Image: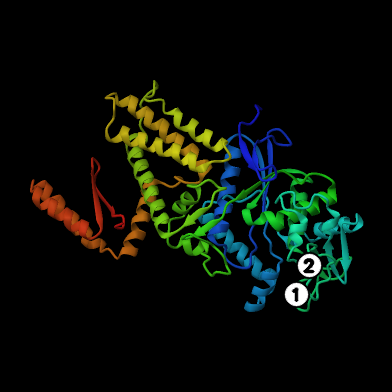
Amino acid sequence: MAPSPIRLFNTMSMQKEPLEPLVPGEVKVYVCGPTVYSYIHIGNARTFTSFDVVVRYLRYRGFKVTYVRNYTDVDDKIIKAAHETGEEPIALASRFVEAFREDARALHLREPDVSPRVSETIPEIIALIGTLVDKGYAYEAKGDVYFAVEKDEDYAKLSKRHVDDLCQGERVQPGDLKRQPLDFALWKAAKPGEVSWDSPWGKGRPGWHIECSAMSEKFLGRTFDIHGGALDLIFPHHENEIAQSESSTGQTMAKYWMHCGFLDLEGAKMSKSLGNVVRLRDALAKVDPEALRFFFLSTHYRHPLNFGEKALQDAEGRMEYFYETLRKVDERVAGKDFGKGPLHGEPARFLAEFESAMDDDFNTAGALGALSGLFGFMNELTDKPPVKDKPLVGRTLQSLREQVRETSRVLGVFEDDPGEWLLRRRDRAVRERGIDVAEVERLLSERTAARAAKDFAKADEVRGALKALGVDIMDTPAGTSWKVAAPAA
């Protein structure tokens, strides 16, 4: 196949590089998944949405993609949560795996090709630790096993930090068995009541970092194309993954490293310690899933994103505009044959602009900008056609509608039936605003009768009464419809 035009920002080199897969035409992707001790928050959701679109676009471009995203189901946080609920840790983790899958489906995240769990990868983890011990990169201490950072000459090459600087302020705490402050646990000796497995060093469980090294190697090989995650994973998690994997194999772990920026909550970094974490499940109860997804994609994945009520309202408003446009277009062209012939206004330019933006480090903000132009053109053709040739306009609208379907496969938005989406949106807004639907329908009937009697003053009076209820009406050739008005600024 022809060389890929896609360029992506590689955290390792700190610059954009052309995507040149290790195997032409195939891309192997590993993304660090959730630690399943609770429901995921919207910061997690933004990261997973970003990489969902990366994988979708690679497939759209014709690549064969193997996408692996793991579940951390063995962890200190899981053990603590299970102790509080009285559940077995693996059972609690399984419960939250299912909760994550439910939330992911709502957000239109596609299932990865492989979703491994730590608890199902213990033999591979133990084997990898054994290799590191045998090669002198790790040491055992009373049932614990630690990675000796001083043995890795390239340590911190991803984060660009200096080891001496990292050591400042770090201490070996009382009770720690590691030799140096930066050494990190590969295997933790079992404590009473904790989940554990047999190993050459006694009963215990894996440390956090070793799991991704073992799972990525098991399903993607010693070297793969793209490793992704959130920005806060660069150090220490991804740094430690590189140290483990490359010390074990002597090969480069991943060719490209991609990281998603932080999500801020009303101008402040979202943090569990600050108590300002918003769970995805709670957000989805208040905002349409596609609108939330649109909000995530409206900013480049590497840039910070500010989460707030106004931003979500704006995203829902934009989605409503898009779906209203699609409904108009579908009413105009669905099931109709406009024959073959030329198109008006070079409509293919919008798809070209979309692809150009996505080729530039998966710039979804630029891609949505191209789509905004496309939707504006569709509205022009439906509301005030610049030409009188109806077949020409119809063919052009059909071409534009097909481009929306193509881009929907990548972005995961505009996938619903427009009428059904708009009705769901209206029903939710009705509940939230406490609007009396029976009263709205009564007033609409009154207005219809007034218009039939050519009593336009009365019709305008009824329109005002509906507006006071928080309702906007639209008169179309197909009849009068209504929606809940946008909240006052």
Residue 77 image position (x, y, % from top left)? 67, 70
Identify the residue shown where x is 44% and y is 45%: 414
Other residues around mark 2 within 10 Å, as few (<14) / some (14–19) / many (≥20): many
**Is residue 320 shown left or right of residue 264?**
left
- Number of marks in picture: 2
The quarter of the rendered structure image containing the N terminus is: top right
Colour scheme of the picture? rainbow
Q: Label 1 near label 2: C-beta < 8 Å?
A: yes
Residue at image mark 1: 194
**Is residue 431 shown left or right of residue 299?**
left
Using the numbered discs, state the Cα–Cα distance from disc 2 to disc 1 in whole angstroms.
9 Å
Note whether 346 is above or below 222 in the view shown.
Answer: above
Q: Is residue 220 visible?
A: yes
**Is residue 233 shown left or right of residue 214?**
left
Residue at image mark 2: 205
The amino acid type, in three-letter code, at marker 1 is Glu
Identify the residue shown where x is 49% and y is 35%: 354
Q: Is residue 86 visible?
A: no
- Compare residues 209 and 447 and report the one nearer the observer: 209
Q: Which of the marked residues, 2 or 1, is nearer the chain's N terminus?
A: 1
Marker disc for residue 371: none
Residue 222 image position (x, y, % from top left)? 79, 46
Q: Secondary structure at mark 2?
A: strand
Identify the residue shown where x is 35% and y is 31%: 336
